[in-house]
Amino acid sequence: MIIAMVFGLRAYNIHTYGSMSSDDAASLADPATYNTTVEGVTVSRYDRTYVRGFHLVPTHRTKAGSVIVFGGSEGSSAFEDAAELARSGVEVYSLFFFGQDGQQSALREVPLEFIEEVLPEAPHPITVRGASKGAELALNLAARYPEIDNVIAVAPSAYSFNGLDYTSSSDRSPHSSWRWRGEPVPYVPFAADATVMMRTIGGSLLGFPTSLRAMYDASLNKASESDRETARIKVENFKGNILLLAGEEDRMWDSAGAASIIADHASRRPDGSGTVESFTYPGAGHALGGPRYIAGLDLGGNEDANKHAHQDSEEVIMRHIADWHEAQSEAQ
């Protein structure tokens, strides 16, 4: 009877919370599943030695420069975000940073140097936009590459964290998400908190969506102050403009708290260069407009707050793109 109750509860929870299946989430990492027909935009594959993705060029460019867009740990190239930007009249590169042919098979020690294949070809000014782990990537790149003029970080992290490698052949030792000049980027490793692990495993067995917020919080709390500072992304090295957007009820990680840390360090840049603006949304979760539950994960937020956050954040992003990428005539 107990076994039947467990399986019944699991089936009910999966049916209730499974707004996106694992197969649906996996399709985001498969470029063959993308609908690349975008009205008023020429879309072509953009493949270099490491880089894989799409190049979106508006038929009538109304904005100067270009935007480089990354998805998150789901492995997508955030193509829909890229298409929306391209429709506004700016050139866009929609890029995968792992999981494709010639790339790291998982989000593990991704070489930050891959951006050097794109920057020489991308028109200035250059804005880099990333969400979640893509925001972590975008901030790491901005801290190292002065060619980048602006960063848009959605649901960001202030730190480089442990990588995410679920491939069957991988070893389970801690590893950084990123590599720079042949060396792992300093990172916060995942903490082995017994209470958090039991709660996560128990919830997973019963089909409840898993929140990873406690794991990330425990990892930061376990790390020493010195180790946290070493792993902190040095945004003060970036001289450009930073736009931060986060939900206050993020259940993936504390992106609102991270935005505060990033803004604090960036606002104290000694030369006073660049601007930093932070928008946080009460009641909104990690996805800022996407579903709360994805492939067994609880991203937080409620429907109304997430909907408002999506609408407002997109308006904010478009305003900043218009400001940062000076208007140009269609003839240009």
Image (cartoon, rainbow, N blue to C red):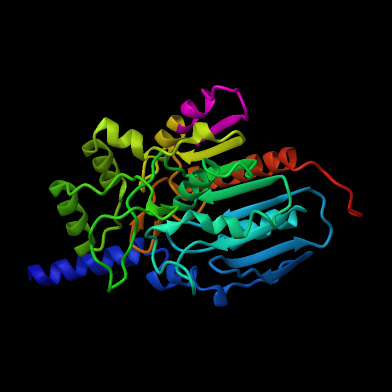
Residue sitting at the far right: 331
In the rendered image, residue 29, in percent from the top left (x then y), is placed at 48, 69
Position of the N terminus, as image quadrant, is bottom left
Q: Is residue 51 above or below residue 309?
A: below
Picture layout, residue 29 above or below residue 305: below
Image quarter of residue 151: top right
Q: Is residue 164 magenta?
A: no
Q: Residue furthest bottom?
A: 32
Instruction: Determine the residue positioned at 31% across, 66% down.
Output: 166
**Which range of residues does the magenta coloring cover?**
262-282
Q: Is residue 80 left or right of residue 218?
A: right
Looking at the picture, tell me which residue is in the foreground, 210 or 171: 171
**How far from the left and from the top, in percent, is residue 26?**
43, 70
Position in image of residue 62 (x %, y %): 82, 50
- Residue plotted at (73% across, 37% down): 323
**Residue 273, magenta (yes or no):** yes
- Residue at horizontal 27 percent and vertical 66 percent from the top: 12
Give residue 169's position: percent from left, percent from top: 27, 73
